[in-house]
Every structure is written in structure tokens, then in C-alpha cells.
Amino acid sequence: MTTLPEVPGVPVGAPPLAVDADEAPVRGLWRQGVSVFCENRLALVGLGLFILLAGVCFLGPLVYHTDQVHTDLAAVHLGPGEQGHPLGTDGVGYDQLGRLMLGGQTSIVVGLAAGILATFLGTLWGAVAGFAGGWVDSAMMRVVDAMMSIPSLFLFMLLAAIVTPSVPMLILIIGAFAWLGPARLVRGEALSLRSREYIQAMRAMGGTGGRAVRRHIVPNAIGTVIVNATFQVADAILYVAYLSFLGLGVPPPAANWGGMLSDGLADTYSGHWWLLYPPGIAIILIVLAFNFMGDGLRDAFEVRLRRR
């Protein structure tokens, strides 16, 4: 008779602990993914940058109170540190640091919301097209190809010139055309997944196409979706900056970093450098943060790159 080894803290003869066969592998994969993400130092730098910028933009106004509604022509173009303004004031007397926080809120909210909307639409469109195949796939992807043949920035400018710019409208405008890239990526994943044995077995048991897309295609392409979502957010923040730089952003007293950059460019030759560099640096840092996080998530979700 073989005697089981004694385990510290467990009485001899006690029944073995029950292990959930479904939850253990999932926990192991998540742990492994987090570990691989943390091994990427640039990904951690990106995460730290995003937390820092988001904290400054959303929590900073609770500590540093400024009036971003009423202009003060008596305090125009004050330099950094003058009269209690750490980053000076702009051409109408707004405190530049408070303006930077307010503009960051708009840029981050529009970027995140538009990126998530574009990822959702692209994932749904690509998954249906790739799983359906045949003429449905051809028709759906020709729509994508036709829209991608038109420069995105031109479409954004056209729509922004037609409608009144606002935060919800910018989210809809950017999200309505930024989903084309995710659609092509997810469609490629769906084409390779639809021929797998478990998909064929599910269809043989009477499963519908909607169930296949919802329960199998999208969950198995989630790595590609999440990684692409980070790049979509970075692109959306840049699109907001482009539109605002061209004068098609949210109107005052609202602000965003692209509009601040455009306003600061006009004063560059007057020596008012504090109106140009802070929003420009903020845009660069937030885009780099999401790109670094995207690289880390790609490593975490890509099995072939894991070293465990």
C-alpha cells in the first residue's frame, strides 16, 4: 500500500482539495499574461505615463482651481510663474496649466470612447464577415476597402465642417470611420478560426452562426482585439488633435490639446513658448503611453512570445 506524502498544514487522511478544472487554467493564463506584461519595461512606463497624465487631468482641477470660463484680459500672456500662474496664461487670460488639464480631459475621453467604439464596430463587422465567408464576406469587405480608399482625415474634416463639433459628435465621427482597420484584422482571425474542429462540432450540434461568433470567434480573437484597441485609442487622440489644430475641434470655453497647440503656434514667434510646448509634449506622451502598452499587451497575449 502506497502512503501519500504528508502536506504541512493538512491533516493526515483528509480528502484532497477540490480544484476547478475550468478556473485553474484561466487563472494560470492571466497570471502568465500579467507576468509577461510586467517584464516589458516600456509597457510599464506607458502604463505609468497614462496613469500620471489621467490623474493630473482629472484629479488636478480638484486641487488647482482655475476659471476656464471667463476671460481675463488684464492677465494676457503672463510668463510661467508670474502672478501665481505656474505655466503662465494664454492670449485671453486663461491659466495655461488649468487649460492643459481641461484639454487633457477632452482629449482622453474622446480618444478612449472613440477607440472603444471603433474596436467594437470593427470586431463585430470583421467577425461576421470572416465567419460567414462567400459572397457575404466579399460584399462586407468591399465596403471596407471602398471606405479605406478615402483618406480618413479628409472624411473627418468633411463631417466636422458639416456638423457642430462637440465631445459626443467627435466620438461618433472618429469612431464611425476608425473601425476599418480592426475589421480587417478580426476578419483574418475569423477566417482561420471558423475551420477549427470545435466550431465544426458546434455547428453539427445545431449551433447558430450568431452563437459561433459570440461564443467562439470573438473570445478567441480577444488578444488581437485588445492590442489593436490601444492603438485605436492613440490614433483617436491624434485625430482629435488634427481636427482641433485645423479649427474643427470643440468650441471655447471647452479645450483640447490640439486646439491649444494650434493657438500656441500663432504665438511662437512672439516668444510665448509656454503656449506651444506643454500641449505638444502632452500629446506625444499620451500617444507613446498607449503604444508602449499595446506592445506589452501584444507580448502578453501572443503565446509564441511568452517565455513560460
Image (tube, rainbow, N blue to C red):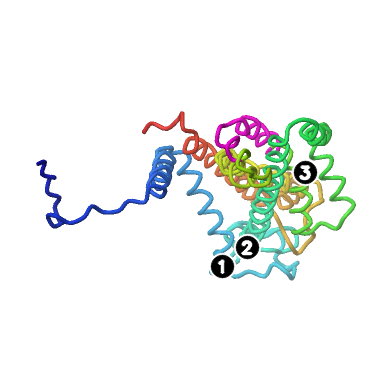
38 or 198, nearer to the observer:
198
Q: Secondary structure at mark 3?
A: helix
Percent across and percent down for residue 113 are 67, 54
Q: Give the total of numbered labels.
A: 3
**Pointer 1 and pointer 3: residues touching (CB < 8 Å)?**
no
Residue 21, x across and y down, in percent: 38, 47
Residue 234 visible in rendering: no
Q: Distance between the Cα atoms at labels 3 and 2?
A: 32 Å
**On screen, residue 49 above or below 85:** above
For label 1, the residue is 64
Q: Is residue 153 above or below residue 108?
A: above
Q: Identify the image quadrant of the C terminus.
A: top left
Drawn side of residue 289 relative to residue 176, left or right: left
Looking at numbered disc 1 in the image, what kind of residue is underneath it?
A: Tyr
Query: Is residue 88 in the magenta section?
Result: no
Which numbered dot is residue 177? 3
In the picture, the disc for residue 98 is 2
Left or right: 174, with 108 as reference point? right
Q: Are marks 1 and 2 in contact (CB under 8 Å)?
A: yes
